[in-house]
């Protein structure tokens, strides 16, 4: 009897173990139903692509997220890993992203728009919806969402190297939008032939061009590098004018090259607040001074002060005796002038340093993106926000066509230098009479 019970206990133990085994296997199947393997690699992503987002703790090279399969060879085997979607918090648009080797790229062209920013091919909204917007280079530098940046030529080279043989073919979409034959889209990059604007719209359905952050010949260059794809199987380079407009693909991570820092100060004299921006090594007020104890509003209208700040003659801007309207002051060191504590009226040399820091087309980069400039608005990629506040040389004039800002630097008496911006792309000096009325921008001590 005891022997029979022993056999029964052993049999029951075996059956229980088998039941547990099958039970665990069933749970595994249930888990598989909740995820789907990325079609281009071994990593898993949220079912259906969802709202999974790439890692945001990456370096400026765009690395981050879970690692893709590393079993590929140098023959151009598939290196794609995670993919998903993310939402641009600025306008709520959703974009696909894909990880290719160590980089995370947007898998669609950017279509972000704000006032006077970018164009749709042939000015048709339907083309923006399909191909994204076309941007000038200055705009392309600043237009990527938070946590993303415009890729450098080097970052494009890394992508091309990771893809290997026939990169153009592998990265191009399979879409019939490619008139001369699409690609295999082996990496879900989805490159489309969105064309560009080079004084006229051209090359849609033939070619796609994407800006890089790389300038052609240093900071003063008027040309920057693009990468483009056409009917060939390569990803080629070009160096067009920065004023042309092309597509933008953003890469994940913050660019380490930025020297721009934004802030705000309060003028303790009247509690007015001013935006500030650090460009290079200088920290500037990003609005014209509007200290109302002195100075006037354009056309004596308070509304103009609210928009453009106040206009001051030179001795008021310097906060010195009116006697120096007719004789040399010969300033020594910094001159606080009418600026708040800790700030001063800039010299002509300090303006030169600002112009040098922003490089080619300085006025375009410093002028506000605002239709107060009419068709001559700027790209304002540094947030300097220069406006055409006009001035007065006996009568008010040039509102919305000219901005002029006093410097501390004197010319032959009774003249001192201002820096001006108008319809051109430069920031020239001129030397009006000290009794003229112009705007003031302050720079931090």
Image (cartoon, rainbow, N blue to C red):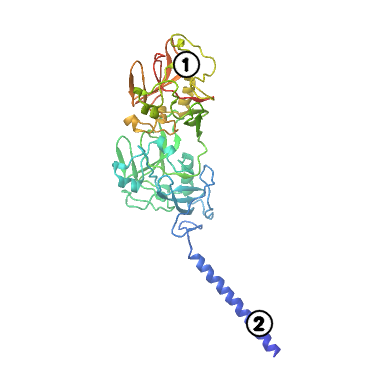
Q: CA distance from mark 2 to mark 1?
A: 101 Å
57 sits left or right of 131 in the view: right
Outermost residue toward the bottom in this view: 1
Check disc 1 and report its element: helix, strand or loop: strand
Residue 248 at what x, y percent from top left?
A: 40, 42
Q: Residue at x 36, y 16 (%)?
A: 393
Residue 5 - label: none
Check disc 2 and report its element: helix, strand or loop: helix
Is 15 rendered above or below residue 239?
A: below
Residue 207 at what x, y percent from top left?
A: 34, 44
Quadrant placement of the C terminus: top right
Badge 2: few (under 14), some or many (20 or more) residues near its Cα, within 10 Å?
Answer: few
Residue 262 at what x, y percent from top left?
A: 49, 34
Badge 1: few (under 14), some or many (20 or more) residues near its Cα, within 10 Å?
Answer: some
Q: Residue at x 47, y 26 (%)?
A: 354
Q: Residue at x 55, y 73 (%)?
A: 23
16 sits left or right of 42 in the view: right
Please name whichever residue, 40 or 300, is drawn nearer the observer in this view of the structure. Answer: 300
Q: Which residue is mark 1?
A: 409
Residue 10 - label: 2
Whether residue 255 appears in this view of the structure is yes
Is 333 rendered above or below residue 36?
A: above
Please name whichever residue, 268 or 46, is drawn nearer the observer in this view of the structure. Answer: 268
Q: Earlier in the sequence, mark 2 or mark 1?
A: 2
Quadrant placement of the N terminus: bottom right
């Amino acid at each position: 009897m005891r022997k029979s019970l022993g056999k029964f206990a052993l049999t029951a133990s075996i059956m229980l173990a088998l039941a547990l085994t099958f039970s665990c296997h069933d749970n595994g199947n249930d888990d598989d139903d909740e995820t789907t393997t990325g079609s281009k690699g071994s990593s898993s992503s949220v079912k259906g692509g969802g709202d999974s987002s790439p890692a945001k703790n990456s370096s400026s090279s765009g690395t981050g997220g879970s690692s893709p399969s590393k079993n590929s060879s140098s023959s151009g085997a598939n290196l794609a890993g995670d993919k998903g979607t993310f939402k641009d918090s600025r306008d709520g648009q959703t974009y696909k992203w894909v990880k290719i080797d160590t980089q995370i790229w947007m898998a669609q062209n950017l279509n972000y728009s704000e006032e006077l920013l970018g164009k749709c091919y042939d000015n048709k909204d339907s083309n923006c919806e399909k191909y994204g917007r076309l941007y000038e280079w200055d705009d392309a530098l600043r237009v990527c969402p938070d946590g993303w940046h415009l890729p450098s030529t080097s970052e494009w080279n890394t992508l091309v190297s990771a893809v290997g043989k026939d990169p153009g073919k592998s990265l191009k979409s399979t879409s019939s939008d490619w008139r001369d034959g699409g690609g295999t889209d082996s990496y879900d990059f989805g490159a489309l032939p969105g064309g560009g604007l080079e004084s006229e719209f051209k090359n849609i359905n033939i070619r796609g061009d994407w800006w890089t952050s790389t300038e052609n010949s240093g900071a003063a260059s008027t040309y920057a590098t693009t990468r483009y794809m056409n009917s060939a199987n390569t990803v080629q380079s070009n160096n067009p004018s920065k004023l042309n407009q092309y597509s933008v693909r953003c890469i994940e991570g913050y660019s380490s090259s930025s020297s721009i820092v934004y802030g705000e100060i309060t003028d303790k004299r009247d509690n007015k607040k001013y935006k500030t921006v650090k460009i290079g090594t200088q920290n500037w007020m990003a609005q014209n001074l509007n200290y109302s104890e002195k100075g006037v509003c354009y056309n004596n209208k308070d509304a103009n002060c609210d928009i453009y700040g106040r206009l001051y003659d030179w001795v008021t801007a310097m906060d010195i005796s009116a006697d120096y309207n007719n004789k040399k002051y010969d300033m020594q060191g910094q001159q606080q002038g009418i600026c708040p504590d800790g700030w001063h009226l800039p010299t002509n040399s300090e303006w030169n340093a600002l112009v040098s820091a922003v490089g080619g087309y300085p006025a375009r980069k410093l002028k506000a993106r605002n239709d107060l400039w009419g068709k001559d608005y700027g790209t304002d990629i540094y947030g300097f926000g220069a406006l055409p506040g006009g001035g007065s040389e006996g009568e008010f004039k040039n509102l919305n066509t000219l901005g002029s800002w006093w410097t501390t630097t004197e010319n032959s008496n009774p003249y001192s230098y201002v820096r001006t911006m108008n319809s051109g792309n430069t920031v020239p000096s001129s030397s009006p009479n000290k009794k003229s009325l112009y705007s003031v921008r302050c720079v931090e001590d």
